Image: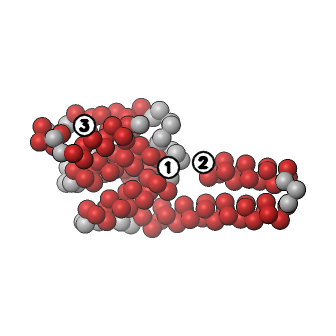
């Protein structure tokens, strides 16, 4: 997604009357790309921490930073969390939301199935929790 923005910005440079302003826009897009790569490196350290609030923040940060990117590395990492029996319900739900963000618009059947299986494996007590209502949001 960001690379597409970069290419679009680069092409529009040649159509723009102000080449200097356009080059400045390209520099901003490149800094966004650099920030996204830094986000992966920084946030991956906190995805498996013991404190659930830190985990949720890191997981949602990855989901937001890579929304629509369909990054396979994140699919592997986040799917592993989704299958973790030790994780709290909140961590699992926000992991599903982050997976939905990363793969938004891709119609990825594997992601949809993992979220549906996660929902089917919940007990009646867990299904009564209000946070479970975010799972359909994760599906899109």
Residue denoted by label 3 = 119
The residue sitting at 49% across, 56% down in the picture is 65
Mark sitting on residue 67: 1
The residue sitting at 75% across, 65% down in the picture is 24
Q: According to the image, what is the colour scheme of the structure?
A: secondary structure
Mark sitting on residue 1: 2
For the C terminus, the image quarter is top left
**Image coords of residue 84 (percent x, y):** 25, 50
The answer to whether residue 87 is left or right of residue 19 is: left
Quick one: label 3, few (<14), some, or many (20+) residues within 10 Å? some
The residue sitting at 25% across, 66% down in the picture is 51
Sequence-first disc among 2 and 1: 2
Q: Are marks 3 and 1 in contact (CB under 8 Å)?
A: no
- The residue at the far left in this view is 125
**Image coords of residue 95 (percent x, y):** 34, 50
Sequence-first disc among 3 and 1: 1
**Image coords of residue 38 (percent x, y):** 52, 66
Viewer-closest of 9 and 51: 9
Helix, strand or loop under label 3: helix
Quick one: label 1, few (<14), some, or many (20+) residues within 10 Å? many
Helix, strand or loop under label 2: loop
Quick one: label 2, few (<14), some, or many (20+) residues within 10 Å? few
Residue 86 shows in the view:
yes
Residue 114 shows in the view:
no
Give the quarter of the image for residue 124. Answer: top left
């Amino acid at each position: 997604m960001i690379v597409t923005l970069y290419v679009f910005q680069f092409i529009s440079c040649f159509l723009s009357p102000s080449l200097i302003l356009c080059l400045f826009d390209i520099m901003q897009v490149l800094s966004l790309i650099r920030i996204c790569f830094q986000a992966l490196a920084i946030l991956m350290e906190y995805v498996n921490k013991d404190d659930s609030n830190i985990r949720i923040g890191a997981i949602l940060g990855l989901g937001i930073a890579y929304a629509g990117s369909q990054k396979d590395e994140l699919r592997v990492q986040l799917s592993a969390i989704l299958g973790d029996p030790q994780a709290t319900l909140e961590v699992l739900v926000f992991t599903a939301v982050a997976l939905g963000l990363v793969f938004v618009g891709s119609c990825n059947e594997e992601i949809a199935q993992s979220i549906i299986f996660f929902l089917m494996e919940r007990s009646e007590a867990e299904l009564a929790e209000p946070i479970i209502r975010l799972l359909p949001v994760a599906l899109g």
